């Protein structure tokens, strides 16, 4: 099976600073992949590079293939034909990502006007249907509203409606629920989950929260310091993380849970600070904070793939289930 | 405080009386849409009143009577007293103020001490020159500023963009006096393309327009330079906005996205700029008319100052101040029309 | 004080980069900004020429010499002479005194009133703020030129009416700039924190608001300085400011009007001086704003 | 011996006369009552619009309730003049959510930490105290010479915590102190807070939207929804046996780690 979206050796740089380095991953048709990482890890830039929407001063190299088309080398015209049609994106801040001076219906139907050449009237009607699909109870009324008249969750649902308008093969969702309240986040995630199922499209969900990704996705890619450090199925990553960073993240995540009391105990934590974008150490980006560091870490470890699992570490965690915070205390 | 009201699930806290709430809120909506408008109008009336008091007080507190000025130093005290009474200048200042204001409100600008002509008529005559001058200058400013600013934004970070930036920076530093004099030197004195100065009147529209070309350019070029900087900043902001990126993620090319999503939003701050520019053009016309000896409001104002024709000065100052304040008001209101977020805000 | 709290987070002790180096880099950023360098250079030149002209000019800028009237540029008179045979270069130098005097004093008046009023309007909601804003509205009706005409009509033309007019016209600008920037600071969390440890409004204005809005205000001052010089030149040109025979760029322009056909250079010199000086101050102001923006983004 | 509560919040209502787009009054808090005992760690949980930030400002006496009263150690603090609050201000300190915006960008860390000492007229050797404070949050003394923006998010929050510790407070109000931080540094800061609360025997009011963090840090919890207190009780009790639907919904909504994809549809 060939991948629907295939990223190979993708790098994004701003002048001399490399913000994303040699990132490779695949997303199959209908597959849901989670991309996790912290601020500065390069996860959002990776998505923007795939969309061809990097901001001024940023440039991408490597290869991004959608089906059998190379996107990075494609003409701007061709990229525009694909954007919104074959590949769509949902952004983090639904307030600023929607145009404040245009009505919701107008913005939701726009994709159809661009790619299906619908008339204004027809796009308007289609937008109302789309709003109904993302669970607006009075779609006609909301279609006539402006973004500021909607709540955060409603805005994000409208964004999703616009993304699914042309039945894209892949949806990239960049922290779609980070700006939302917990209960609203749940609702938006459920909606996204259902729509992706119905549409049968692939999803690349970018998040900083491993739990969110584990609920929605089949597979997880972990990024740190502009690189992919580990990837695998959700169960592989949750049950046997092999990269020390993934493992530590997971340990914290498990210790901090709504369903288990840990009152007053020390949480397993990762020492040090997150390297800021572009200012990564030589070799493995995690070495400064890693308790499994060895001499070899000063050289960047190669990405080793075994089946659908990949890892870039000289001294990976082996066997056994991760201790849930054993080394704390 | 915007509560996230994404359709509360049924078990949430008790709903308020839905229907009653909606009726009340639509009523409130109507009131709250008009109230700020009324409030804004009221503040302008207050500002106009304040401005008129200011003008009146400054021009009437000085020692020495206008009658003395008019009649000259040789005049007998009796003659001065008589003229003072005739002009109504022996009344208390407050009633003089209300006489003046009352006249203005009814469109009666009074009679000049000096020329004994109706000031209203003189101002009307002058406006036939100043009005077109300001409009042409604005047009020139827009014609220069809009494309230059747009190009500057689209070429940002390239050499051509920096060049455009430098040119507008330079343009802003050239006062209209300098621009006017240099245009005269080059186009009139050396190349004889345009008439030097003066105004032939509108009886010959072609000659009248010719006489207005250089003044309009010297006034408009500077404003164009200023405008281009605002346009550039405004478009750049749009280009960097999240929603423009969203538009592009839907498959629009940069230019299309800018046209569909950027221009309207960019126009919002630009309306302010155009309004303020118009105000500064009205004031700038005072200078340019003097460079080119155009018989407009500026020349009339300056002549009145030199002749100590204070009523005329008072009238024109008030007229200009009113124009500026009304333009400010219009800018405010148009903001509200263009930006749906501001509907009904104070 | 125990430090046994966090056994597994020693690397938090690491501090980025070196002290002195960071300070140097901050200074270096100023010198790498072309607007600041060019603008600052021009401003320095103007200030220098104004200072020197107090003690020395090649010729007395007021000395009439009919024999050398309207002379072309030469070694004796670098920029030639005017219709009375006065040395153009000396007059340009002397004029820079007036430009700087008017610019500095009017900006001083505007800031001395505008900044405190703006701070007050920001710190005290309600009646005081309303009064300040209404006064601002009124003053907005009187741009510098109009204010100058009214004042000249009332008190006669002089350097001081120009200063006063420009100063008054810029008061509302400073009120608005100060108020809006101060409001941003006053609504920040660090001010909330300061209030939580007992700082009162006045200390907050002094310790937090003023330092944080200073750069913006200085940039605005530089920009308005350039506009003041523009206005001063226009007013002098109209005969509403500095009166002949005192040399100022505006009066030089006015008298050059009669020689546009024969001696265009008489128009050119003061024009160049005005443009350069205005450019200098506005570039400097722009540069300061740019640096502030850059710092805020980083 | 009867213990005087650290805070007694008695039927507090706060209404903002909003000048916003709808121009009507906004109920930020409605009829809230609870007490905080010395040594207690109270979690205040709610989503945006719940009024939790308003509550933290009221507890700090930075704003006055529209009706009702707040007592600290038996004395009413709401509506008191600033000069009468000196003692209160020494005893109650706050840490905000975003350590960048809660630290003045124009001040060096030394001044940031010394400011509360100066403002509250605390007689100490300033330099010595600053070093001590930095040490208690695991920061090197050299940090004093730098500006806040020269540090990472986690380090900045350490500085903000050090500032709050300056006056040796008895009560720490923490308003979402870890939600702006990266996942991998969040645990550091939570551990630091846990340690400090134990070491200095602090009473803590911890305002958060994150149920998991509240469960980890707090022994009792108050749940707010749109300005109303919907549930309160011991943390274990509330988390294990929530009585209100809204609390249940909040708990169900929190994302959970799963080895196999699947969202529980919140019924």
Image: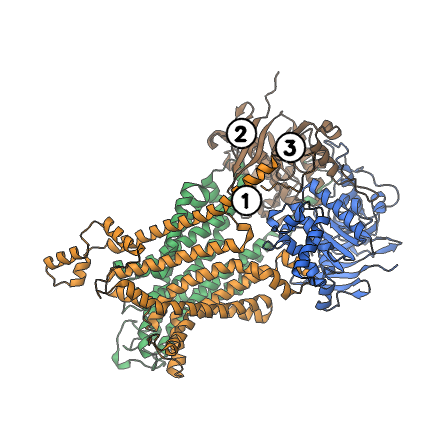
Q: Label 2: which residue? A: D88
The figure's colour scheme reads by chain
Q: Secondary structure at mark 3?
A: loop
Instruction: Tell me the orange chain.
Output: B
Identity of the residue furthest to the bottom in this view: B191
Q: Nearer the viewer, mark 1 or mark 2?
A: 1
Q: Tell me how far mark 1 sits from mark 2, CA to CA.
A: 22 Å
Chain D's colour? brown
> What residue is shown at x 83% (from left), y 39% (from top)?
A323
Q: Tell me how far mark 2 sits from mark 3, CA to CA.
A: 38 Å
Q: Secondary structure at mark 1?
A: loop
User: Mark 3, residues whose alpha carbon is within 10 Å: few (<14), some, or many (≥20)?
Assistant: few
Chain of the residue that carries numbered disc 2 in the rendered image: D
Chain of the residue that carries numbered disc 1 in the rendered image: C
User: Can residue C131 be seen from the camera position used here?
Assistant: yes
User: Mark 2, residues whose alpha carbon is within 10 Å: few (<14), some, or many (≥20)?
Assistant: many
Instruction: Tell me the green chain.
Output: C
Q: Label 3: which residue? A: B14
Q: Which mark is residue A278?
A: none
> What residue is shown at x 86% (from left), y 55% (from top)?
A304
- Viewer-proximal residue, B72 or A227? B72
User: Mark 1, residues whose alpha carbon is within 10 Å: few (<14), some, or many (≥20)?
Assistant: some
D173 is higher (above) or lower (below) than C211? above
Q: Secondary structure at mark 2?
A: helix
In the image, is C228 to the left or to the right of B344? Answer: left
Which quarter of the picture shows residue C265?
bottom left
C277 is higher (above) or lower (below) than B209? above
Residue contact at pointers 2 and 3, CB within 8 angstroms: no
Instruction: Tell me the blue chain.
Output: A
Q: Position of residue D239 (x, y in %)?
A: 73, 30
Q: Which mark is residue C188?
A: 1
> What residue is shown at x 27% (from left), y 63% (from top)?
B119
């Amino acid at each position: 099976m060939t991948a629907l979206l295939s990223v190979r050796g993708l790098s994004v740089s701003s002048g001399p600073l490399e913000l994303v380095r040699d990132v490779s991953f695949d997303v199959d048709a209908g597959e849901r992949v989670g991309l996790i990482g912290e601020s500065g890890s390069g996860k959002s830039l990776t998505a923007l590079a795939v969309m061809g929407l990097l901001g001024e001063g940023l440039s991408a190299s490597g290869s991004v293939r959608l089906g059998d088309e190379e996107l990075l080398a494609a003409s701007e015209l061709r990229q525009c034909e694909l954007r919104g049609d074959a590949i769509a994106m949902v952004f983090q801040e639904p307030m600023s990502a929607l145009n404040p001076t245009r009505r919701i219906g107008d913005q939701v139907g726009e994709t159809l006007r661009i790619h299906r050449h619908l008339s204004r009237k027809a796009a308007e009607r289609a937008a109302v249907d789309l709003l109904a699909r993302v669970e607006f109870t009075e779609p006609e009324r909301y279609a006539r509203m402006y973004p500021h008249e909607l709540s955060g969750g409603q805005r994000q649902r409208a964004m999703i409606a616009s993304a699914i308008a042309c039945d894209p093969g892949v949806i990239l969702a960049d922290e779609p629920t980070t700006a939302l309240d917990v209960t609203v986040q749940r609702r938006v995630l459920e909606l996204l989950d259902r729509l992706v199922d119905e549409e049968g499209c692939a999803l690349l969900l970018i998040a900083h929260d491993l739990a969110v990704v584990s609920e929605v996705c089949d597979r997880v890619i972990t990024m740190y310091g502009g690189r992919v450090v580990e990837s695998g199925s959700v169960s592989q990553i949750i049950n046997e993380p092999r990269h020390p960073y993934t493992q530590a993240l997971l340990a914290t995540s498990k210790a901090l849970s709504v369903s288990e009391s840990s009152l007053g105990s020390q949480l397993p934590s990762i020492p040090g600070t997150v390297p800021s974008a572009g200012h990564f150490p030589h070799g493995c980006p995690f070495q400064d904070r890693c308790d499994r560091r060895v001499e070899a870490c000063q050289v960047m470890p190669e990405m080793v793939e075994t089946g659908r699992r990949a890892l870039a570490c000289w001294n990976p965690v082996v066997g056994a289930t991760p201790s849930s915070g054993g080394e704390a205390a | 405080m915007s509560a996230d009201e994404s359709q509360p699930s049924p078990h949430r806290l008790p709903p308020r009386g839905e229907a009653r709430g909606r009726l009340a809120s639509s009523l409130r909506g109507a009131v709250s849409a008009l109230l700020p408008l009324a409030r804004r109008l009221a503040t302008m009336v207050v500002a106009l009143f304040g401005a008129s008091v200011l003008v009146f007080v400054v021009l009437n507190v000085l020692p020495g009577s206008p009658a003395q000025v008019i009649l000259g130093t040789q005049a007998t005290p009796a003659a001065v007293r008589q003229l003072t009474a005739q002009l109504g200048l022996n009344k208390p200042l407050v009633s003089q103020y209300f006489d003046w204001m009352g006249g203005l409100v009814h469109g009666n600008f009074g009679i000049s001490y000096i020329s004994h002509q109706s000031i209203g008529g003189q101002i009307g005559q002058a406006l036939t020159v100043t009005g077109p001058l300001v409009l042409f200058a604005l047009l020139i400013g827009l014609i220069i500023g809009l494309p230059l600013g747009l190009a500057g934004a689209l070429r940002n970070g390239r050499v051509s963009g920096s060049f455009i930036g430098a040119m507008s920076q330079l343009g802003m530093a050239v006062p209209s006096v300098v621009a006017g004099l240099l245009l005269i030197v080059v186009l009139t004195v050396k190349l004889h393309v345009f008439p030097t100065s003066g105004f032939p009147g509108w009886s010959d529209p072609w000659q009248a327009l010719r006489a207005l070309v250089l003044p309009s350019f010297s006034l408009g070029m500077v404003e164009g330079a200023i405008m281009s900087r605002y346009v550039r900043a405004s478009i750049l902001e749009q280009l960097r906005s999240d929603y423009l990126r969203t538009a592009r993620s839907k498959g629009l090319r940069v230019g299309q996205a800018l046209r569909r999503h950027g221009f309207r939003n960019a126009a919002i701050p630009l309306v302010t700029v155009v309004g303020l520019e118009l105000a500064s053009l009205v004031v700038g016309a005072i200078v340019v008319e003097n460079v080119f000896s155009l018989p407009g409001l500026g020349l009339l104002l300056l002549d009145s100052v030199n002749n100590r024709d204070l009523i005329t000065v008072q009238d024109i100052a008030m007229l200009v101040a009113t124009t500026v304040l009304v333009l400010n008001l219009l800018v405010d209101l148009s903001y509200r029309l263009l930006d749906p977020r501001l509907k009904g805000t104070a | 004080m125990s430090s046994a709290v966090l056994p597994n987070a020693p690397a938090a002790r690491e501090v980025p980069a070196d002290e002195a180096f960071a300070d140097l880099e901050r200074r270096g950023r100023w010198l790498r900004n072309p607007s600041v360098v060019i603008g600052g250079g021009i401003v320095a030149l103007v200030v220098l020429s104004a200072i020197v002209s107090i003690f020395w000019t090649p010729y007395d800028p007021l000395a009439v010499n009919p024999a050398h009237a309207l002379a072309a540029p030469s070694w004796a008179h670098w920029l030639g002479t005017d219709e009375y045979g006065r040395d153009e270069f000396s007059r340009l130098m002397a004029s820079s005194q007036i430009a700087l005097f008017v610019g500095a004093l009017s900006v001083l008046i505007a800031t001395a009133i505008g900044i405190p009023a703006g701070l007050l309007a920001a710190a005290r909601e309600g009646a005081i703020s309303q009064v300040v804003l209404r006064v601002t509205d009124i003053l907005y009706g009187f741009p510098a030129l109009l204010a100058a005409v009214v004042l000249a009509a009332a008190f006669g033309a002089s350097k001081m009416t120009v200063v006063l007019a420009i100063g008054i016209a810029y008061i509302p600008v400073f009120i608005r700039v100060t108020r809006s920037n101060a409001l941003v600071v006053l609504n920040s969390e660090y001010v909330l924190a300061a209030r939580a440890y007992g700082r009162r409004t006045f200390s907050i204005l002094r310790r937090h608001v003023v330092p944080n809005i200073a750069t913006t205000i200085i940039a605005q001052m530089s920009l308005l300085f350039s506009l003041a010089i523009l206005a001063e030149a226009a007013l002098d040109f109209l005969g509403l400011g500095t009166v002949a025979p005192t040399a100022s760029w505006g009066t030089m322009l006015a008298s050059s009007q009669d020689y546009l056909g024969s001696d265009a250079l008489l128009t050119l010199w003061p024009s160049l001086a005005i443009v350069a000086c205005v450019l200098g101050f506005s570039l400097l102001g722009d540069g300061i704003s740019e640096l502030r923006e850059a710092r805020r983004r980083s | 011996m009867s213990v005087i509560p650290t805070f007694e919040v008695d039927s507090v209502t706060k209404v903002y006369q909003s000048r916003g787009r709808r121009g009507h009054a906004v109920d930020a808090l409605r009829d809230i009552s609870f007490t905080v005992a010395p040594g207690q760690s109270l979690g205040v949980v709610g989503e945006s619009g719940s009024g939790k930030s308003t509550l933290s400002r009221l507890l700090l006496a930075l704003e006055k309730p529209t009706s009702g009263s707040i007592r600290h150690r038996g004395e009413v603090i709401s509506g008191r003049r600033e000069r009468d609050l000196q003692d209160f201000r020494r005893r109650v300190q706050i840490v905000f959510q975003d350590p960048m915006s809660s630290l003045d960008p124009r001040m060096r860390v030394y001044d940031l930490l010394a400011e509360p000492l100066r403002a509250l007229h605390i007689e100490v050797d300033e330099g010595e105290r600053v070093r001590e404070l930095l040490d208690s949050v695991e920061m090197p003394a050299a940090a004093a010479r730098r500006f806040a923006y020269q540090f990472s998010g986690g380090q900045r929050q350490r500085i903000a915590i050090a500032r709050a510790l300056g006056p040796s407070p008895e009560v720490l109000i923490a308003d979402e102190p870890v939600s702006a931080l990266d996942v991998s540094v969040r645990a550091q800061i939570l551990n630091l807070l846990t340690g400090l609360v134990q070491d200095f025997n602090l009473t803590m009011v911890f305002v958060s939207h994150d149920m998991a963090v509240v469960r980890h840090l707090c022994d009792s919890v108050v749940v707010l929804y749109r300005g109303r207190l919907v549930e309160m009780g011991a943390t274990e009790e509330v988390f294990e046996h929530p009585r209100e639907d809204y609390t249940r919904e909040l708990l169900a909504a929190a994302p959970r780690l799963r080895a196999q994809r699947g969202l529980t549809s919140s019924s």
